[in-house]
Image (cartoon, helix red, strand yellow):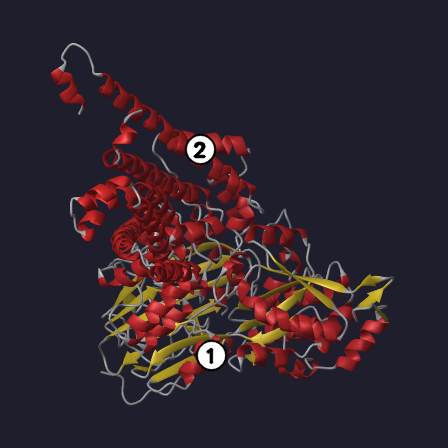
Amino acid sequence: MRSRSTKAIVGTLLLGTVASCGGTTEAAGPSGAPVRGGTLRVAVADEPECLDPQQSPTAASRFLARPLVDSLVNQGGGGRIAPWLATEWRVSTDRLAYTFTLRKNVKFADGAVFDAAAVKANLDRVVNPATKSLLAASLISAYDKSTVVDEHTVEIRLKHPDSTFLSALATPNLGIQSPATLTGDPAARCATVIGTGPFRSAEGFASQKGISYTRNPDYAWPPEGAENDGAAWLDAIEIQIAPDAGARYGALTSGQVDAIANVSPTNARELGSTNGFVLHSTPYPGIPFSYWPNTASGPFADRKVRTAFRLGIDWPRITENVYFGVYGPAKGVLTPTTPGYDASLESQYRFDVAEANRLLDGAGYATKDSQGYRTKDGKRLTVRHMWSDAGVTDLATQVQAGAKEIGIETVEENLDGGTFVDRLLKGDYDLIDTNFAAPGPQVLQVLLGAENIPTPERGIANNMARYTAPAVQADFARALEAADQESQFKAYADAQRKITDDAAVFPIYDDRTTFGATSRVNSVAFLADGAPDFHQIWLSQ
Amino acid sequence: MTSLAIKSEPRRVSPAAVRVLRVVAVRLLGAVGVLVGAATATFFLIQAMPGSTTDVLLARTQASPAVRAQVIAEYRLDDSLFTQFFAYLGKLATGDFGTSFVLRRPVWDAIGTQLPRTLELVAATLVLTVVASVVLAVIGAGRRRWARSLFSGVEGLIVAVPPFWLGLVLLGVFSFSLHWFPAIGSSDFSGLVLPAIALAAHPVAVVTRVLREGLLRTLDEPFVLAARARGISEVALRARHVLRHAALPVTSLLGWITGSLIGGAVIIEIVFSRQGVGRLLLSAVQNKDMPLVIGVVLLAATVFVVVNALVDAAAWLLDPRTREH
């Protein structure tokens, strides 16, 4: 994840908008049998504007709310959906009705019983416009209504088939909260969230400060296959908000906290070689950090120019120069840990200057001006890279130098957030950069679906490539209506191939989630969206 | 004062009392004017920032059209600018600061949560500034030229150091290495020391210089010669007589510094992971969160007005000449 700053508007904001939790993606070797007890002190960079993930779209709200709320289902490695608060479910043949059988003897932290009515209350509340849900409601945009069949059975009906519905339910954004807390002013949930999770927090989240959790001693309903099948090992967790990367790192190495999230690349390299500390890290599933060309207008409307830009720049070397091996070079539209990733396309993401030059000659940019830039009809081949996050500066400088080698001028435009949004909506740019963490291949539609092009009427949306290729849109539609995961992945694999052939995105590096900790912190593993799984972490005494 | 005057002359109000009352009335009117002006300027400056409020508010989201419509309706973002402005002013007049668009809670509540930590920091910084400046200025106002150049050079150096860098150096030495003070998130006294030093460095350098110049100027005054002739010690001369003269320009400087610290401590708050109004203001501006931005601006303006009134009162006490008109 990029360091947080003023890219505020699109980059970081979009970052990780869709994500689910529950599965573990990487386990670091724990030593010996887990021990119960202890308080884990953690410093994190980002804070949510509101703790409630049904309202907030931020990764920070998912991170801080996940210990408090469980979901109906869990998404594990490879995108597999596993039982959690729902022990089993049936999908009707028209794929419009999902009937969930709910786990019995589950209690919320306020003593309320988890039942079918609670599920209905949660989903109805998410889609109620008064909740002003900035993400959760969109994740289940196909939702029509819930019916309580009996105390432990709920039927959910969709308006149209949506093969991503279960993985949406797995996110903390659709985590189940105590029904009594959902009536009344939604704002009250911005500080306290009451769920069935392995931890509880009586005082809740304090803005700019953090949140403290204590173990839920009754917890006996983790997702199927969880490493810890009972109450959490930790007595308590204290999370502090510490926005400065250097201060977080110093607090860790001087023993003032036990762990930190968002370790900067420089600190990550240092921590990896420091005795007594461990850098836990896993690649984010989703879309790599990429440059997105404006495929609708300007030089990048020409596929040859896009392909030349992708082939003619040595992206892996730039990644190595800027992030010294902490992040790996991207080899596809999705990252390799994303379910449905098509590895057969990797060979197309190669460095081939000769081919790039040939393509540019063919596109009519055969002449060069006195400064060595290509021209067509006397006009220089110039692309404008627009950004508002200073974190991208080093990378952008190197890309600029790489593009110059093949005769393309990149102009760097560092904008304030408002101007950035304005020009994004108008399509007044040639290049934008962002990554996007997400639990599955459906993220392709979020970033390349024709209905997601940002416009003044629609407002902000994420198809910054303004990409509309009908064949790819048809693949997206086919994927949504897919009857099973295999055919869904097949449709998304077709889309990945066409997007690659079309050079609709320039993937640069695979982002990683990082969690630096002392070696007393054991059994660190990551959930599907990159947050650490606090339920299974234990402290050596 | 007023009551005393009335007692001594029961028939009519003394001219002095009228003068004081008039000054107070003009002050109060001026204060209201400053606050209304600050709210108005802030409102229109936010609107002048590029990007529509709705787009910036929803920038980091995947809000559905229904939610977008709800946000616009609830915050009245489709009303004309002037309708929005007068609706806001009307609410403000009744003491309602509105609800933060982004934090979804009352502005006053959002500010109230962060304010105590800010006030602590500002108070500590001011105390540190006054004490350090007086000590350094009295020591530095020696007659030796090289000593003065040395002090002046160090002051220039301090002013050139960015506060965040100084903060990181202090953290590195006194927290990470020596473990004397906590690095992040502490709300007790030990957590206040390093941030206050980092924040006070610039004001100390500036105030010391102003104060020292004042001291040196005053030392040339004839009354100093008279005092020395009476055989007063050099320290007593400076502390009792000269300092009082030199302090006058410094008091108004301190008033200005205090006002700027309320929202201006943001870098220090970030480096030391402190709660504070500065961080609140920064994110509010980035998000075009109009009610919250205006709330913080009004707070800073109020502090500014109050402190300046105190400064004038201090001047009134320090310098009899300011009482004449």
> Hey, which quadrant is residue B303 in on the image?
top left
> Hey, which quadrant is residue B132 in on the image?
bottom left
Nearest the camera: B151 or A87? B151
Nearest the camera: B297 or A486? B297
Judged from the image, the secondary structure of the residue bearing numbered disc 2 is helix
Q: Is residue B238 left or right of residue A451?
A: left
The image quadrant where one finds the N terminus of chain B is top left
The residue pinned by badge 1 equals A282
Q: Name the residue at 63% across, 54% down.
A: A424
- The subunit letter for the residue under badge 1 reads A
Amino acid on which disc 2 is placed: Gly
> Hey, which quadrant is residue A254 in on the image?
bottom left
From the top left corner, tell me how far across and down residue A503 is, in percent: 71, 71
From the top left corner, tell me how far across and down residue A482 is, in percent: 60, 69
Furthest toward the left, the residue is B7
Q: Is residue B187 left or right of residue A434?
A: left
Q: Name the residue at 77% across, 69% down.
A: A305
- The subunit letter for the residue under badge 2 reads B
- Whether discs 1 and 2 lie on one chain: the answer is no
Furthest toward the bottom, the residue is A32
Nearest the camera: A235 or A376? A376
Nearest the camera: A211 or B292? B292
The residue pinned by badge 2 equals B37
Q: Is residue A242 left or right of residue A444?
A: left
